[in-house]
Image (cartoon, coloured by chain):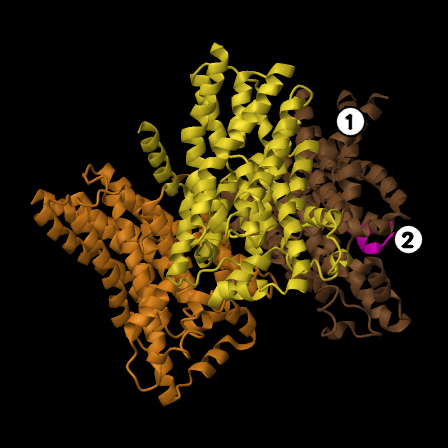
Chain colours: A brown, B yellow, C orange
Amino acid sequence: MDFLSGFLMRFMGQLQSPTLGFLIGGMVIASLGSQLQIPDAIYKFIVFMLLMKVGLSGGIAIRNANLSEMLLPALFAAVMGILIVFIGRYTLARMPNVKVVDAVATAGLFGAVSGSTLAAALTLLEEQGIEYEAWAGALYPFMDIPALVTAIVVASIYLSKRKRDKYYFNEEYVSKQSVAVGGYTDEISGPASRYPGGSGITAAGYPKDPDTTPGKRVRIWPIVKESLQGSALSALLLGIALGILTRPDSVFESFYEPLFRGLLSILMLVMGMEAWSRLGELRKVAQWYAVYAVIAPLVHGLIAFGLGMIAHFVTGFSLGGVVILAVIACSSSDISGPPTLRAGIPSANPSAYIGASTAVGTPVAIALGIPLYIGLAQAFMGG
Amino acid sequence: MDFLSGFLMRFMGQLQSPTLGFLIGGMVIASLGSQLQIPDAIYKFIVFMLLMKVGLSGGIAIRNANLSEMLLPALFAAVMGILIVFIGRYTLARMPNVKVVDAVATAGLFGAVSGSTLAAALTLLEEQGIEYEAWAGALYPFMDIPALVTAIVVASIYLSKRKRDKYYFNEEYVSKQSVAVGGYTDEISGPASRYPGGSGITAAGYPKDPDTTPGKRVRIWPIVKESLQGSALSALLLGIALGILTRPDSVFESFYEPLFRGLLSILMLVMGMEAWSRLGELRKVAQWYAVYAVIAPLVHGLIAFGLGMIAHFVTGFSLGGVVILAVIACSSSDISGPPTLRAGIPSANPSAYIGASTAVGTPVAIALGIPLYIGLAQAFMGG
Amino acid sequence: MDFLSGFLMRFMGQLQSPTLGFLIGGMVIASLGSQLQIPDAIYKFIVFMLLMKVGLSGGIAIRNANLSEMLLPALFAAVMGILIVFIGRYTLARMPNVKVVDAVATAGLFGAVSGSTLAAALTLLEEQGIEYEAWAGALYPFMDIPALVTAIVVASIYLSKRKRDKYYFNEEYVSKQSVAVGGYTDEISGPASRYPGGSGITAAGYPKDPDTTPGKRVRIWPIVKESLQGSALSALLLGIALGILTRPDSVFESFYEPLFRGLLSILMLVMGMEAWSRLGELRKVAQWYAVYAVIAPLVHGLIAFGLGMIAHFVTGFSLGGVVILAVIACSSSDISGPPTLRAGIPSANPSAYIGASTAVGTPVAIALGIPLYIGLAQAFMGG
């Protein structure tokens, strides 16, 4: 009962967060026929800024981390990030009428990490007097980045295979798309084709690619390479490299970090305007997203808790650290993930993945996940 | 004598303010043939950012206000905002050679509120020990926003009627325009057509509109609706809604607020470059703007003072609050107003409305208006 | 030995600075085939912002300076700024295979001033107890701006003459260019033609110019005027004028200054991506840049030291001030210069001028120049 009311309070609180507020605001003005537009160049720049910030902060965290000591937990974090995407690929994406790219993007977001959920967990651990390694918070990029990269690559491979199949089975892919967007084509195809590197995946990239001619098996490596060279992942990876190899802290703290939330609010507005026109796509499948968004975070956290216990027995990883690993697996990103997925999987429906993550996944992680894993850890302590 | 020298000192000080400095700077480099250009996408983004900030700050002020207590003064503030535009429409706009859109935009700016004039009045009230309600300063959005919205809608209705009449009387509207802008067409038509939502009002919007075919009476509601759906007002109203309904305070304080003055300086530069080429239009009518800019603020303030006195006797609104209501009616916006009008009434000449407001209206309000209304209030106190 | 290890440490440190880090990052992702792009409108806006900031900070420094007292040193600073460009024009630019525009841009950067080198010198002077005038640091814009303006004008004159000669000697200019950029044409010609004002110098400006028809002597003044009207110099000069004549300090400190380093990091990324494709051009001439970047700063500093000594004997300019004049002549800009040159001489190769200045010139100035001039001053004091 207490759990439920706590959950509902957090759910209502999330609706007032600027992130979701701007998303819903964009949906509302789109529904009212507003002619507001964010210029394409600005949109691309905002995405670049957000990816660079996500990359830089990950890179700086890795540079400052004690890599030798955190080797096994970091490895487990990366494994979890990748695993979560594949879990989504073989559960949510298999549900009737659920679009695969939407499901993969959603799984990518659930694999990525929410800074605020992590902060909530750290606060609670301290309140309960449970000790953890100082570097445990720095595990997040080791899960966050593999999850996002895996989601983008898995989506690219899927789209590429589908493209090839289309030549044979003459799937009604293209015509379906055109119907879905209706009279709104310009507004929609705008954002989708905005990020040339990313959208190259669905469109420009393949005709010239000899490896994907009809009849042949799709070769994975060229698609992975193309995903990594796309504008989304190259900005992200460049940020990580600069964060690790140079000293960008001053420019990060004076520029990328303070502008982040504001630029994100504008991106959310744009995504909301687009989401409005694609909300209909979700009518038949919303229940699958709801079920996934409640169950998946708890399952991810339990698997990570198990991996953390292995590290606990092998290398003496603290029980507090195990909780942190479980919480970052349980959390779903509402900040760093959306811009990356928007640029990397432009054809995925943001209403699906942001709705599932921010509106359901995050409250579940905070209200159910954190107490669950802390309780488990305390059970092991008492034992 | 003291009044005059105080006024002149404030007038000179205004010329050094960054707002007017960048405007004049833009005029100077345009006159010297500079090829400096602010890309169109940047221009649109700046206008969006400014409108969003104006909307958010208004919405946050309304959310934090004690609505039930301030009902009557807030109503009077809104009435004043609308009334000021109509006063301008039937005085300044009727002067020989004065263009109606320029006059309406100027009246909109005089209806909008200057934060710095308001701050000066609050400081003086405290120095004089005159008490006022803590929420009295929050009356400003109730006047500011109705004034700007009314100005944009009145201008749209005027342009729409004129458009219809043109079919009959074959007014030399188009040819006059082309001559006015001369060889500078590209520079001018650029900014004017930059904001698609807004400029749709003057150009793209109407041919398709069956309500405005020649011979019929112009229907008001479709024009109001189109104004509200235009990019200018939808950004403004979205900001207000987000400010009232969500908790955007952190993103407002870390992003929209700190970037505001800087982005405004760039907008002023762009408007200055455009203003230069349109300065000639004002040669024959500058005296009317000067007369309006001196008399109108004082008259607006006196009407508002009268309305405030009604609230004083009916609901016990403090005399300090009455002064504040008079001062915000007397003040003319030099910050929030220009971007809104620029986007909402793109065909209006910024040299007219910014010149009248910033160079004359603001010094008049500070040097003459504030002392006048405080003196009046003290006379009532003594009585 | 100590000198050498100190130099090498500073050299390695420079490679980790965000400025150079983002430049090298851009080169690396370009070499890996990344499809990352910064939209053209954003690029132009960033250049505008950087130039505005450089201009404003120069203008504010001049406004706050004691002009009558610093007249002679300021004059010498301006003379040095101009002289350094001509020294480069008649030494580096004459080396075999060195392109004249690249050499002139490099000389412009060595004439411009590095704020961090200046700060290092001021710290050392205070440590050594050598007194200097409080306004001596404000000498920098008097050298910085004339050097950059002279470089842009000299490059324009050269390109204009070359353009005229092409009609006669049918130089293989155009074809050479196309070969140099290879399959990367779009990426390169993009940035090069991005800043219409600046690139007008090389392309659009001249066909219409009657003064440069084949066979006539190129007239200098129209080219100077066109350079000053170009978007690069008009933003810079407007910033200076606003800094001197208005009070833009608040908008400068809240907007232009804090955004500077971040926007510069993005510009560096863009320049790095371009530099990668033009690195090959430098293969045959890198040694000349290396020799210039080691010798030129020390020579510039010695000439400035001599001029400073004249001011010392004529007007009593302090020996500490003489050191400062020598250090700002010795220093080469790694912050304010690149955006100005990028916009003003778009055809110059950034790999040449930034590489020479940031990677070699700045460590030479800090590790060799500053101790040399302080030692000289102490010799004069002891004498």
Residue at the extreme right of the image, as rendered: A96
Q: Earlier in the sequence, mark 2 or mark 1?
A: 1
What residue does disc 2 label? Answer: A97
Query: Could you say whether the residue bearing mark 1 is in a helix, strand or loop?
Result: helix
Q: Position of residue A297 (x, y in %)?
A: 80, 38
- Tell which of B128 and B245 is nearer to you: B128
What residue does disc 1 label? Answer: A9
- Read off the magenta span: A92-108
| Distance between the alpha carbons at the discs numbered 2 and 1 | 32 Å
Q: Is residue B243 left or right of residue C179?
A: right
Numbered label attached to residue A132: none
Looking at the image, residue C275 lies above or below residue C324: below
The amino acid pointed to by label 1 is: Met
Label 2 chain ID: A
Q: Is residue B94 visible?
A: yes
Most frequent secondary structure within the magenta stretch: helix
- Residue sitting at 55 percent across and 69 percent down? C187
Residue A240 highlighted magenta (yes or no)? no
Residue at the extreme left of the image, as rendered: C383
- Residue sitting at 43 percent across and 63 percent down? B35
Looking at the image, residue B382 lies above or below residue A297: above
Q: Is residue A146 visible?
A: no
Looking at the image, residue C350 lies above or below residue C235: below
Which image quarter is the N terminus of chain B in? top left
